[in-house]
Image: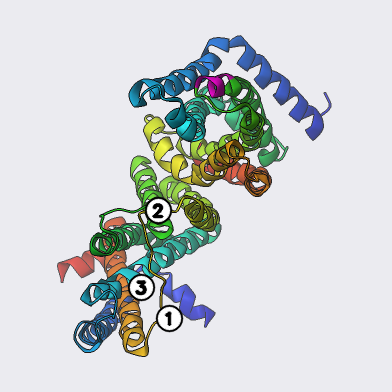
Amino acid sequence: MWQFFHKLASPKFFYDFSSRLIFWFSVLTIILMASGLYMGLVEAPPDYQQKDSYRIMFIHVPAAWMSMFVYMVMAVTGAINLIWRIKLADIISMSCAPIGASFTFLALITGSIWGKPMWGTWWVWDARLTSELILLFLYLGYMALRASIEDKTNASRAAAVLALVGVVNIPIIHYSVEWWNTLHQGPTVTKLDKPSIHTSMLIPLLLMAFAFKTYFVSVLLMRARTELLVREFRSSWVKKVLSE
Amino acid sequence: MTRPTTFQACKSLLKRDLTLAFRHRGELANPLLFFIIVVSLFPLGIGPETNILRTIAPGIIWVAALLAALLSLETIFRSDFDDGSLEQMLLSPHPAALLVAIKVFVHWLVSGVPLILLSPLLGVLLQIPEESMLILVVSLTLGTPILSLVGSIGVALTVGLRRGGLLLSLLVLPLYTPVLIFGASAVTNAAFDLPVTAQLYFLAALCVLAITLAPIATAAALRISTD
């Protein structure tokens, strides 16, 4: 078991192993996403209040879940890099940031597109939208810090510290924003009571959530592989890979 | 020569930083002037109606305090980093987190405390009712240490960079949001005679959390930056 992890941390083994993983995760993503989208967009009945516009939820909710999840992955791999100085963990952590920022951005965009017909405006200072926005800022700060430190090792460690600070702060920010929102709830916003979700909508939602997860894994591994090649460009195995 | 104890080291560091701050009084005044100017620009932009000003005053004062704290942050480690004394501090046998905490404390004394003392004056300018003035001062007293402590992590991460200033605001401002929310809402509530204990307790809790954890993170970040 441990031996497998040690082997995984070696760049060359990871490079070969991840190519197989990417294949299987991509296949899974296509299957899950196709079935999830079909069930969500075609089979699930329209909502009795929101009609068809609720269907954007099948993208919005998984994206929002992923935005938090990716940050956790980024922080945990960052901590692993900080403690055990495993280069591969840093590569994973680094590759997480743009993907997570994209998920956050997607959640924000879909949220505001959904908000236009529902709330009548593109943007509402809704608690969850606001904390997603702050999460996006945290991602951008992480990427900016990494970009501005030239030394790669120092950049990775500084970014890891920032990610850990962010992890401590995310729940605080999230709950304080939620608390703020209940106090400042504007009178124009009549937020519909969320009905408990029906199975015909829950199943495609879960399928989409899994599809986003597998999609994340495959894109993450792709990014990590590219970064690995860039960082190890001097080693012999990279030269061999590239000459093939 | 005997080796100084940790307590002695802390005491001399405290004294040294205070002396340094005192010798550069001009630098300390700048963030305060900024605080006053920003706050007095808002009525010019919004209009002098008492009611509107009164509603937005807590938010304005708190946002201005946030920005003023951000401006003054750079000075915590900058000169020590440039002349190498920061490295000596990290190399010393005393716990780095403790020394960092002392430095942040001094920074709060010379930037946070004057800001707190000035805030009632700005409250008067923005028509904050007298009853909530005390809450404004209390909320700032609980909140400004958090600004210094959390900010010190950001400064520690960016101190080695040439153009760290803008980056610093990107790193630190999102982390300031909880303080802003609780601080401003305490003052708003006080103006309407609503209970404010919840907000103040939250601020106090955040303050304790920041005192416990931030120096450790800052020390770790400084070690990376001076590497």
**Magenta part of the chain:** B121-125
State whether residue A147 is above or below residue A213.
Answer: above
Residue that protrudes farthest toward the left in the picture: A244
Q: Quadrant of the C terminus of chain A?
A: bottom left
Q: Secondary structure at mark 1?
A: loop
Chain of the residue where label 3 is placed in the rendered structure: A
Residue B131 located within the stretch drawn in magenta: no
Crowd rating for badge 1 (residues with CA inside 10 Å; few <14, some 14–19, many 20+): few
Cα separation, mark 1 vs mark 3, equals 43 Å
First of labels 1, 2 by sequence position: 2
Task: Look at mark 3 in the image and give the residue it sits on.
Answer: A14
Amino acid carrying mark 3 in the image: Phe
Residue A71 in percent (x, y) is at 43, 61
Precedes in sequence: disc 1 or disc 3: 3
Which mark is nearer the camera, 1 or 3? 1
- Type of amino acid under label 1: Ser
> What residue is pinned by disc 2?
A187
Residue B102 seen in the current view: yes
- Report the residue marked by disc 1: A196
